[in-house]
Image (tube, rainbow, N blue to C red):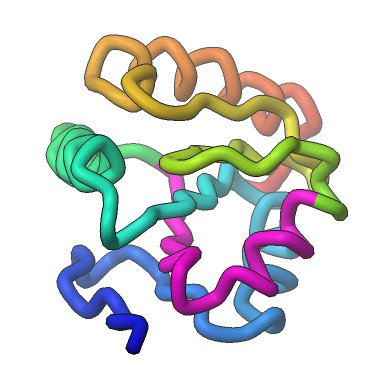
Amino acid sequence: MLRTETNIPGDWINIDSWEKVEQAIKWSDERPVFIFKHSTRCGLSAQAKNELEVWSQKGKRELSIFYLDLLTHRDISNRIATITKVAHQSPQLIAIANGEAVDAISHSSIEENELNHFYNKIFPLVESTGAPD
């Protein structure tokens, strides 16, 4: 039996339906959105989740993080890979801006320094469009 992850930060949005993915894409018109694909049975994925959690709690960022337990929702994970044209990996962090996947990192790249670089690269894409504050 697959276990559904319940230990996620309160400000992350749990993806438990395709409608949550659609919500993420819609929100990305106003601010960057990250979709984090997590395998609850993988030690590297658990470490990446912890890194992302610690990083996201440092400083105030205009960012929403959507969380996907890919073992429970593999069908949603596959659909995300298809619509974003980002090949599935685990763990994986996909950046969505203006309705499009603009970048992704995975595995051990999901750590504080790389997350700072990743975020700083993504955020100007939203600012340059004149999205509302």
Identify the residue at horizontal 62%, vertical 20% (top origin): 124
Expressed as whole percent of the image width and height from the top left, the position of residue 82 reads: 85, 52
Task: Residue 80: say if magenta.
Answer: yes
Q: Is residue 113 above or below residue 105?
A: above
Identify the residue at horizontal 60%, vertical 69% (top origin): 74
Expressed as whole percent of the image width and height from the top left, the position of residue 11 reads: 28, 66
Q: Is residue 106 above or below residue 13?
A: above
Q: Is residue 28 above or below residue 2?
A: above
Q: Is residue 60 visible?
A: no
Query: 15 left or right of 39?
Result: right
Q: Hey, which quadrant is residue 88 in on the image?
A: top right
Q: Hey, which quadrant is residue 40 in on the image?
A: bottom left
Task: Residue 64: say if magenta.
Answer: yes
Expressed as whole percent of the image width and height from the top left, the position of residue 34 reads: 52, 46
| The N terminus sits in image quarter | bottom left
Q: Is residue 66 visible?
A: yes
**Span colored in magenta:** 62-81
